[in-house]
Image (tube, rainbow, N blue to C red):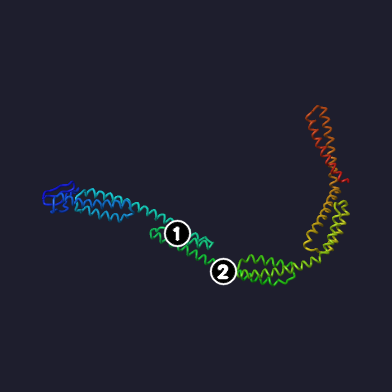
Amino acid sequence: MSSATDPYGRVDEDGTVYVKTADGERVVGSWQAGAPEEALAYFRRKYEALVTEVELLEQRVRTTDLSPAQAEQSIARLRESVTNAHAVGDLDALARRLDMLSELVAKRREELRAAREHARNEARAIKERIVAEAERIAAEETHWKNGGERLRQLVEEWKAADRIDRPTEAALWKRLSAARNAFTKRRKAYFASLEDQREQARKEKERLVAEAEAMVDSTDWSETAAAYRELMRRWKAVGRAGREAEEELWARFKAAQDTFFAARAAAYAERDHELRGNAEIKEQLLVEAERLLPVRDVRQARQALRSIQERWDAAGPVPRDMRDRLENRLRKVEEAVRAAEEAEWQRTNPEARARAEATVAQLRSSIEQLEKQLAQAREAGRDKEAKDAEEALTARRAWLEEAERTLAEFTR
């Protein structure tokens, strides 16, 4: 058999086939069945099969989500196939392509690691936020329905979030569970306390109802009405009992009040009917009193008003719905007479008259002095002094006119 050569291999005379690599030649097989060229072609086809496998792996790594671990296993398997390949071709080039693919996978692994770390950090932040909100609800929330619903939502948010490292996950879950338990415990304690409060309120309101029912037949209208108002104040201060007890007790309490106040209203209506006659007398007295206005003779008006007041008191009480209107009319007359008396006293007051006379005399004297000063200033040609004296005289004369009017009031 004659020998044959190839850029990447050869066949010697005895049919041994060699491949050429950077490390030198190595035997890849032998060929005894035909020409050396056929041997090289056969082993080149084996090389081309390896090229196809490498290309397929490159495509999978670049275009699919093949995991780094699976990719490295495939690269290692192919690397071993290339290293020990019974093929003729540029095996060094295939090894370099596998090296480049390994670098790509290593970069992919680092990117995935960074992405997983980022996702874990985000998940940890989410779960820390969930735990913090749960602990706030456990410590502060008093709207129990909303708080319980929000805690259930937080658990679902926890489940939807990515997992983080086991120790941190376990510690945060323990805090979340503790917050839920604390909220449940506080809610139960609140409602237990609420039940105690309602029971105490029920007992207290039963006592109030008993007091209200005991007074229902009282005819001491004023005192009993005040007592019912006090019972109502105490009722509001007690707080609510349970719904059924509250409704039943309130119905009894209100019935007792309504019965008493209806009886009082009937009694007042009967009494008011009897007092209509007194109101008619007072209406006549008011007509007599209002004739005194306006007051002309203070002494006569005072005597007449005193007589009217004595007869007013003697007439007795009037219906409540008329009392304020009648008393207001009489009060206006009394105030008018009192004002007239005050004005009369001021007019006849000796001290005030004396002060008014002194003021008039003082102003007249001052005017005489100023008139002399004015004449002297004019004779001497002192224009400024003359002008000042004129201004002072004008003011004093106006004051004198007012003082004389006041004095005249005392001489009427």
The three-letter amino acid code for the residue at tag 1 is: Glu
Mark nearer the N terminus (2 vs 1): 1
Residue at 72% x, 72% y is 217
Task: Please name the amino acid that badge 2 sits on.
Answer: Glu
> Is residue 262 rendered to the left or right of residue 60?
right
Q: Quadrant of residue 361?
A: top right
2 vs 1, front mark: 1
Residue 401 x %, y %: 84, 39
Can you identify the residue that label 2 sits on? 195
Which of the pair 133/266 is nearer the observer? 266
Name above or below for residue 53 compared with residue 322.
Answer: above
Please state if 303 lies on the left or on the right of 15 as rendered: right
In which image quadrant can residue 360 be found?
Answer: top right
Total count of labels:
2
Residue visible at 80% across and 27% down in the picture: 381
Q: Secondary structure at mark 1?
A: helix
Circle 1 residue: 157
Where in the figure is residue 6, as x and y percent of width and height? 17, 47
**Tag 2: Cα neighbours inside 10 Å, few (<14), some, or many (≥20)?**
some
